[in-house]
């Protein structure tokens, strides 16, 4: 089924009128927003008043993680875990009139696991609903997607996102980086390590444009300071380069307020080709890290940094 914008009223009416589909897929470019939309629907489904009231037994059990009518997995689920779905489908709902199988980050499931889920999704018990969240729905098998009603989590304007957050400079930055999703901004605000990762990325970017001969070793050291979250470090450096590229092209878009000076310097230092090539290097490395989680981080960063410095040497303004 095709993707539509998420409308909570439509979903609430479907529940109230007992017209709930067999499977739903909630999507967004950022994980927190996709998961947030899926969880909101799950709360509506399990709430005694179907309003996600937060006060009834259904809501409280869901929050506590002990709702007997809900089976939850994530994209790293093993086949042994997924096989439990079969038994779950045959059980009668205990606390309400429906059961739910929620798969968070379903686009991370291996093809074998997705194929295994096809049969229960094709022939689910009439009282069971499958709820999936994904940031890259194209990674799901077409047969899985076709079984689901698809909803895209709605975006908000940057000012609306900021207004939903506690006041402060970080809130303004989080809103700028959220992609229009309050859930993502809230996740960033609560993630103290993220702010140091971003600071290291800004320091790396600054070295590229303020030092005559940037040290590859020092750049690597900053990017590897949070080696377990190397993808985040690469992503933040990529965001800075993308902002600089937009500035060099005269974009009037709003930029993250914590890096205005750095990105302005990058836009003036590099030629447009230099920013494009640097962006491509970072994008390629980010995608490679996403595809292969067992990659040697130190070697990956070393190769990436040397390529970035080669571009810097060739594609800067005189």
Image (tube, rainbow, N blue to C red):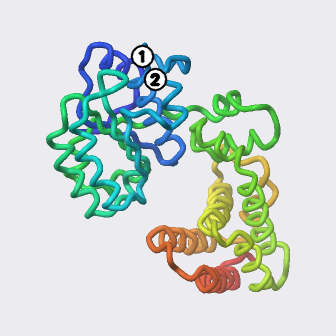
Q: Nearer the viewer, residue 212 or 143?
A: 143
Residue 215 screen position, x and y as percent: 79, 85
**Residue 244: which quarter of the image?**
bottom right
Q: Nearer the viewer, residue 227 or 210?
A: 227
Q: Is residue 314 left or right of residue 32?
A: right
Residue 121 screen position, x and y as percent: 21, 43
Identify the disc placed on residue 58: 2
Residue 130 screen position, x and y as percent: 30, 39
The residue that appears at 22% across and 58% down in the rendered structure is 115
The residue that appears at 57% across and 38% down in the rendered structure is 181
User: What kind of element bears circle 2?
Assistant: helix
Q: Is residue 133 left or right of residue 24?
A: right
Q: Is residue 267 left or right of residue 59?
A: right
**Residue count near mark 1 (Cα–Cα under 10 Å), binned few <14, some 14–19, many ≥20:** some
**Residue with the mark numbered 1:** 48
Q: Earlier in the sequence, mark 1 or mark 2?
A: 1
């Amino acid at each position: 089924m095709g993707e539509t914008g998420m409308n909570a009223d439509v979903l609430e009416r479907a529940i109230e009128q007992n017209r709930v589909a067999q499977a739903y897929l909630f999507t967004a470019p950022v994980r927190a927003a996709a998961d947030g939309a899926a969880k909101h629907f799950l709360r509506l489904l399990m709430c005694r008043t179907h309003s996600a009231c937060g006060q009834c037994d259904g809501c409280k059990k869901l929050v506590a993680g002990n709702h007997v009518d809900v089976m939850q997995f994530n994209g790293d689920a093993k086949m042994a875990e997924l096989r439990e779905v079969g038994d779950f489908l045959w059980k009668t709902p205990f606390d309400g009139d429906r059961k739910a199988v929620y798969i968070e980050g379903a686009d991370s499931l291996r093809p074998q696991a997705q194929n295994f889920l096809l049969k229960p999704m094709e022939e689910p018990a009439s009282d069971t609903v499958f709820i999936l969240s994904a940031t890259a729905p194209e990674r799901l098998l077409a047969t899985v997607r076709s079984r689901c009603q698809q909803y895209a989590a709605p975006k908000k304007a940057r000012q609306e996102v900021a207004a939903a957050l506690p006041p402060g400079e970080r809130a303004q930055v989080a809103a700028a980086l959220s992609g229009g999703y309050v859930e993502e901004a809230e996740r960033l605000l609560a993630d103290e390590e993220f702010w140091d990762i971003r600071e290291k990325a800004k320091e790396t970017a600054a070295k590229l444009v303020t030092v005559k001969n940037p040290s590859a070793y020092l750049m690597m050291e900053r990017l590897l300071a949070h080696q377990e979250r190397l993808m985040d470090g690469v992503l933040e450096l990529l965001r800075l380069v993308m902002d600089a590229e937009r500035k060099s092209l005269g974009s009037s878009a709003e930029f993250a307020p914590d890096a205005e000076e750095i990105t302005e310097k990058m836009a003036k230092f590099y030629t447009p080709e230099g920013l494009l090539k640097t962006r491509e290097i970072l994008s390629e490395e980010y995608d490679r890290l996403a595809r292969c989680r067992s990659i040697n981080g130190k070697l990956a960063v070393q190769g990436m940094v040397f390529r970035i410095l080669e571009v810097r040497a060739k594609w800067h303004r005189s």
